[in-house]
Image (cartoon, grey):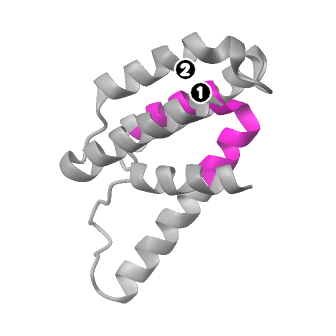
Amino acid sequence: MLSRVVLGLALGGVGICDVRTRKVSMPILIGGVLVLLALSPWNEGVDGRAMLGGVFLGLTLSLVSMVSGGRMGFGDGLVFCMTGVCLGFWENLTLMSLSFLFAGIFGAVGLLMKKLTMRQRIPFVPFVVVGYLGTLCL
């Protein structure tokens, strides 16, 4: 339970930085990972294999960022590494799916209302925060 609170606080901090600067705060991210790793023995339902699978999802996104020339931020993949430490593979995959869904809906509505353009970048971590809140309700 404590790890979920720490994850929520870290995501909130990284999300605020992402909105303000369009960059992921590495000190908050690294601090969050270290605290979550320290709490991992008490994280119910997430064993070492599930944790590694969750981190693998984030590393895969970071690789996609490098291959795509930064279309998706490298830091966004690192955020999913952090969430993978706490959530494991399947719940991190659910979080990732919800985050992409919410970002896609936001982008589509913004395009339809002519508030966004196809070339415009939007911060992604706030959608991860909303997706995380959604996973807490599932």
From the viewer's perspective, is residue 65 above or below residue 35? Answer: below
Name the mark on residue 54: none
Residue type for callout 2: Leu
Percent x, y of residue 45: 80, 27
Percent x, y of residue 132: 57, 49
Furthest toward the front, the residue is 2
Name the mark on residue 36: 2
Q: Name the residue under label 1.
A: 3
**Residue sitting nearer the eye, 40 or 22:** 40
- In contact (CB < 8 Å): disc 2 and disc 1: yes
On the picture, is 6 further left or further right than 114? right
Q: Give the range drawn in magenta.
A: 76-97
Mark 2 and mark 1: Cα distance apart in space: 6 Å
Residue at 54%, 20% (x, y): give it. Answer: 36
**96 inside magenta stretch:** yes
Percent x, y of residue 58: 55, 33
Counting residues from the N terminus, which is met first, the one under dot 2 or under dot 1?
A: 1
